[in-house]
Image (cartoon, grey):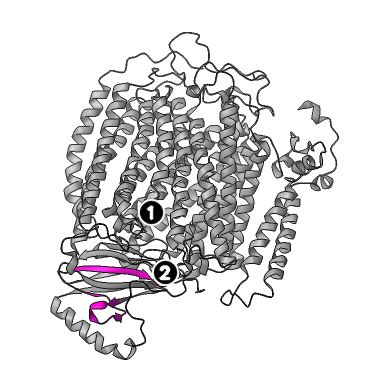
Amino acid sequence: MSAQPAAAGSSPAHGRRFLAAWIVLSAILTPVVAFFLGPAIPPGNGSVEATGQVFDNEVLVAVSTPVCVFVVLFLGYALVSFRSRTAEIVDGPPLRGDMRIQIAWMIVTGATVLGLAAFGTYELLQGGAGGGQGPNAAFLPAGHNHALDVQVIGQQWEFTYRYPTFGGLETPQLVLPANTLIRLHVTSLDAVHSFWAYQLGVKADANPGTDNVVYVQTKGARSFDIRCAELCGLWHGYMFDTGQVVDQGRFTAWAKQQQTYFTPVARYLPPYATTYMPDPQRRAG
Amino acid sequence: MSATAVEIRPPVWRRLIGFNAITGVIFGIIGYYLGWFLGHHITGKSIAFFADIDQNDLSVLLGYFFGVSGFLIGLGFGVYPWARLRGYPPSLREKETQGTSRYFGLCTDHKVVGIQYLIGIGLFFFIGGLNAMLIRVELLRPASQVFPAGQYLTLVGMHGTMMMGMMTSGILGPFANYFVPLMIGARRMAFPRIESLTFWLLMAAGAVLTTTIFFGGFPTGWTGYEPLNSQANTGMDSYLVFFALVGVSMCLLGLNMLATIITMRAPGLTWSRLPIFCWAVVSTSILNLLAAPVLIAVLGMAILDRTAQTTFFNPQGGGSPYLYQNLFWVFGHPEVYILALPGMGIVLELLPVFARKPLWGYRLAVSGLLGVTLLSWLVWQHHLFVSGINSDLRPFYMLSTELISIPTGFTFLCGLMTLWRGQIRFTVPLLFCLAWFFNFLIGGLSGVFLSDVPSDVTTHGSFFSMAHFHYTIMGGLVFAFFAAIYYWSPKMFGYTLNERLGKIHFWVMFISFNSTFAPLFAVGFLGQPRRTVTYAHNLQFLNDWVSVSAFVLGLSMLVFLYNFVYSLLFARIRAPQNPWSSLSLEWQLPSPVPVHNFDRIPVITGDPYDYGNPSPGAIPATAPAGGSS
């Protein structure tokens, strides 16, 4: 069965050689990934939040690169250098651990993890990073008192939008003013939906009976894709739309025009509220 | 063995009558219609009262309840308790020690249960995998083309639910049931009837979920979020009953494993000599035992919402959909480590054998497994980062989630350092273990993106997260599962699987797996949500690439199936007793393993990783078992 252990011929330089190769490769690959791949990672620069997310992703790919290089290089090195070259089974040296390596590993992984968590928290504190924050938003951006309120109502299977500053106007299109801080109130009339404005870096679940607040600071005029990101029933796959960010003047004109257009139906709408209470269990589809 | 061989056996038709799977199915069908009738009888007069219920959930649920009970009674699970209640001596029928018929009924031999699990779960894997193929057929084009939207959602839901439910026992079922008693020097599991019950519950559950197609399927995916859950038609009841039965099975399996490993270790097998696979089973079983009851509770509440019109999850009646999400993920996040830990255990168990070195840093590896077990309870709200629940707690869940990579990193370090300066032999099981490292690395790193709130805003609910958990579950658990089956089949069946076919299987599977799931990270980043039947036109090339790769991945499973059937039924090359020259206790037993495992309980004098021990004529770490060789 187990024969004599292999002659301890394997040179002790293996460890140093591997570490040198790891450092060199990481030093080359990390900047390449961070500065070439990183900026290409979505969701782009549609809003301040989206730009923040791109930066976040850049940092994460940069930190991941040395880790990835370490494991793949280690596997490659070990498989080439330590493959058994004999027909009969020979045992390796009985190494059962090394406290120095274990402690070094714990320190490095621990520091990386704590650093990432601190970085993520710092980014999150910048106004919530585009994620839904519930009725009492914990992380507020500067100037949140002057944000424009827009309500997003998820229902099977479309989003509609209400503008409380324009008399509770409800429209099937989302149009937002450029360079403005916007407070979206996301809620639902039936199942759980998730409002995903891709290029704006916004995602917030729409729960019935809940006012899910998310802040987004728009940049220049552009269009953006809206999709439902939470399975909400039969036509979930068709619950997509395109929204617009337009200049301030065009936005006001559009809102006025919509108000006039929807005047005949406005009186049938329930008054604007943060949540609405239909029966979410009515059977659909 | 020879004593029972001379016994006169009754004719075949006579042997088919009695407590077995056939009787179980017949009783199950009778039970279903009994419950169905009862449900209609109860609701018959009042159905009009529940104005907006268009189908009778109560009769379907009662049908499943009576059907499953009938199935278990038909299998003979009532015999022992009934005899005890009446004060009769219990029947000894379960102790039947040979013949193929014991594979089709209640059998208390843990080795039979292990093989039952392997085949039974394999069957449902096949159904789940077929669903995945059909999903990829649909996604060849951006618009809905092959399946209508509702059928597509049912496919997605069945694939996810079937895989999640069956994978929980994917390694614990076949391999822990078979090998834990052998590894710890025991003759049986602590609760052999419960052991059999966990298997048959899982089979009943699988049948229940499959019948959802007769009730129009269900639209919720594997998470079953409320209030969509309460809206859905009777197909939803299949999902609820399936997962509740899986929960009962998981809970009992964990209990049984813990009791076995705690109380039935051979003399000398201290905790610090326990094989690392058994440690992985211990940590998984803790999660099984504690997480599954939460699942059963939340599904019970959903069942009440659907039948008794309670409003646990209905905001109009004072409930909250958040309650469902919270409770589901309190179960759901330990659940994903129930899927990951056994894979880690298999890899760490196999590496020393093929690197011919002791497991490096045994204590660190154990603390890694237990650390994951502990931390997995503290992370569940990272599934709800954008849901609006407890938004001020997100930094905590971000931290706790990222902390899990520390104990996970321990297992990586131990595995990698075990290879270092070893004498590595490239066998099929080792290849699968190495692939596990690569896949789990990608899965783990992508998990860091999902745990980071700003990054999660884009990736949450997109194909990115789908690719992430396929890398950890399929790349982790399923690759470890195949490593285990190639490694242990000589002991389980007495025949070696064909190595050449095994290597073809490995390379096709490894390449097509990565070719399938790596592009999905990009697809998710580019804005494709999960579970949608349509997608943006500019993503068609990537989706087609993924679909074709997925079909090749499906074919690689057929290569394995061919190898399995060919090697075990046709080639039948007898495997030596210990083909890998392993020092682990199970390989010191003859193949096939005798019914009572050990004639004499062995005395353990060391851990099973004593490779390269320089002292000449060293005592094997595991004293040879009596009756073998």
Q: Is residue A147 rendered to the left or right of residue B36?
A: left
Left or right: B75 with respect to B141?
A: right
Give the residue at x 51% y 43%. B290
Q: Element type at marker 1?
A: helix
Q: Are marks 1 and 2 in contact (CB under 8 Å)?
A: no
Identify the amino acid type marked 2: His
Q: Which residues are magenta?
A: A162-191
The residue to which callout 1 is attached is B383
Q: Is residue B536 visible?
A: no
Where residue B526 appears, x then y in whole percent? 29, 60
Q: What residue is rendered at 45% in x and 39% in y? A: B341
Farthest residue, direction bottom:
A264
Q: Is residue B261 above or below residue A150?
A: above
The image quadrant of residue B98 is top right
Residue at screen point 47% across, 14% down? A3
Q: Is residue A216 left or right of residue B255?
A: left
Q: At which x and y percent is residue B481?
A: 50, 40
Magenta span includes A164: yes
| Chain letter belonging to callout 2 | A
Q: Is residue A122 above or below residue A171?
A: above
* Type of amino acid at the residue the image marks with label 1: His
Q: Give the x, y percent position of residue B42.
A: 69, 69
Few, some or many residues within 10 Å of mark 2 (<14, 14–19, 20+): many
Q: Quadrant of residue A171?
A: bottom left
A59 in relation to A82, above or below: below
Q: Position of residue A45 (x, y in %)?
A: 18, 62
Q: Nearer the viewer, residue B327 or A205?
A: B327
Is B58 rendered above or below residue B286?
below
Asked if residue A54 lies left or right of residue A236, the reply is left
Name the residue that disc number 2 marks: A236
